[in-house]
């Protein structure tokens, strides 16, 4: 393939906001391994000094402002490429302008939709509509998200699932450091309404009230962190709950390996990379509906609802499950091969 590709991302590990950034990083690196000509444009403050990564000055402002600043610069670069590949709403304007003024083919991948987000940036819905309706090829990361996009916008995307993520270990003794003496239940992610952390906390409280002992470790940060800590105090379970903040990539595997159960209580989870990380570490998972379960057999994830009683039962079942092993994991190489076929369709 002799096409030249410009990708537009938002972050790059370890400087990330979510699973979208992990997806972009793996796709970029897998395409490079295949000797595909690909450049990745990122906001300057999140762009590592790495070959073929283009840092874009975005200035001060909210995410919507930064996305607009990026779009102007990226669109001006587009005439040097054959394909522009954007992700979610923040890449919509860049993709649209590049297609209109430079004649490049536009691929748009949607990782989540605005109706699932509790916090929105200015003009997000209009840009999301653009990112769904106008590209030459529309992709998404799970069938459940694809169905939602079809219902909301009337366009059916091509589903290309993410790969399974492996995380590093550093040898950190999580249980010892946190002085955990009981079974460890773990969550990591953004502290936002759609992640359902308050349901997890209340379900954990009910699990303790049923005469059980365990300790809950909550990783990550967000605008709800302080209110979640207050909720734990109100429920009088502070002794059993540990807020550990941001967990560096090099230590994340240590937390999964130390856990007896990982819980993903999201109200909406288009895919769920933390689920794959936990499974890859051999940790049982209790999770609400997600995209990962589309590529696994039904017994490999304990199904729960974003409801405290359901989560209580999921914790009970999960802590009796023991370590697990997933065979034939989907890889990021598998994902990139399928996306490469999309690019080849423009030849």
Image: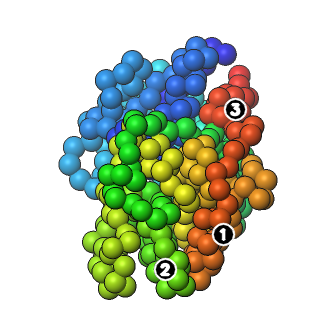
- Which is more toward the observer, 184 or 1? 184
First in sequence: mark 2 or mark 3? Answer: 2
- Against 308, is 251 above or below? above
Image vertical order of residue 151 relative to residue 6, above or below: below
Badge 2 is on which residue?
A: 208
How far is mark 2 from mark 3, CA to CA?
42 Å
Around disc 1, counting alpha carbons within 10 Å, would you say few (fewer than 14), some (14 to 19), or many (20 or more)? some
* Discs 2, 3 touching: Cβ within 8 Å: no
Residue in the image at 31% along x and 43% along y: 69
Q: Residues within 10 Å of mark 2 (few under 14, many from 20)?
A: some
Residues at marks 1 and 3, CA–CA distance in whole angstroms: 32 Å
Q: Nearer the viewer, residue 42 or 336?
A: 336
Image coords of residue 187 (percent x, y): 47, 60
Element class at badge 1: helix
User: Which circle's residue, 2 or 1, is located before the other in the chain?
Assistant: 2
Q: Which mark is residue 235?
A: none
Circle 3 sits on which residue? 334
Q: Nearer the viewer, mark 1 or mark 3?
A: 1
Quarter of the figure with residue 260: bottom right
Query: Taking 24 as reference, is 233 left or right?
Result: left
Q: How many marks?
A: 3
Labels 2, 3: front one: 2
Nearest the viewer among 5 and 243 is 243
Residue 60, given in percent of the width and then of the height, sits at 20, 48
Picture quadrant of residue 313: bottom right
- Residue 300 in view in this figure: yes
């Amino acid at each position: 393939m002799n096409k030249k590709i410009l990708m537009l991302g938002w972050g790059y590990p370890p400087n990330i906001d979510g699973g979208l950034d992990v997806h972009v990083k793996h796709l970029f690196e897998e395409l490079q391994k295949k000797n595909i000509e690909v450049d990745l444009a990122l906001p300057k403050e999140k762009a590592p000094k790495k070959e073929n990564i283009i840092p874009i000055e975005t200035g001060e402002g909210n995410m919507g402002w930064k996305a607009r600043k990026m779009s102007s610069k990226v669109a001006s670069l587009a005439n040097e490429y054959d394909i522009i590949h954007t992700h979610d709403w923040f890449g919509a304007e860049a993709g649209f302008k590049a297609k209109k003024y430079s004649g490049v083919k536009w691929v748009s991948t949607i990782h989540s939709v605005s109706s699932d987000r509790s916090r929105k940036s200015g003009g997000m819905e209009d840009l999301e509509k653009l990112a769904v309706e106008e590209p030459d090829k529309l992709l998404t990361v799970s069938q459940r998200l694809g169905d939602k996009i079809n219902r909301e916008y009337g366009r059916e995307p091509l589903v290309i699932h993410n790969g399974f993520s492996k995380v590093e270990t550093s040898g950190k003794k999580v249980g010892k450091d946190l002085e955990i003496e009981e079974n460890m239940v773990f969550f990591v992610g953004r502290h936002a309404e759609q992640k359902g952390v308050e349901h997890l906390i209340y379900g954990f409280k009910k699990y303790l009230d049923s005469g059980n002992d365990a300790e809950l470790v909550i990783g990550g940060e967000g605008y709800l962190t302080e209110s979640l800590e207050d909720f734990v105090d109100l429920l009088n379970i502070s002794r059993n709950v540990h807020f550990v903040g941001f967990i560096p990539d090099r230590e994340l595997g240590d937390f999964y390996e130390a856990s007896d159960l990982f819980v993903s209580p999201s109200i909406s989870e288009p895919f769920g990379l933390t689920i794959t990380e936990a499974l890859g570490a051999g940790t049982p998972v209790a999770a609400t509906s997600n995209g990962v379960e589309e590529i696994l057999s039904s017994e490999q994830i304990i199904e729960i609802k974003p409801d405290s009683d359901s989560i209580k039962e999921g914790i009970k079942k999960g802590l009796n499950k023991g370590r697990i092993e997933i065979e034939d994991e989907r890889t990021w190489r598998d994902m990139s091969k399928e996306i490469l076929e999309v690019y080849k369709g423009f030849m």
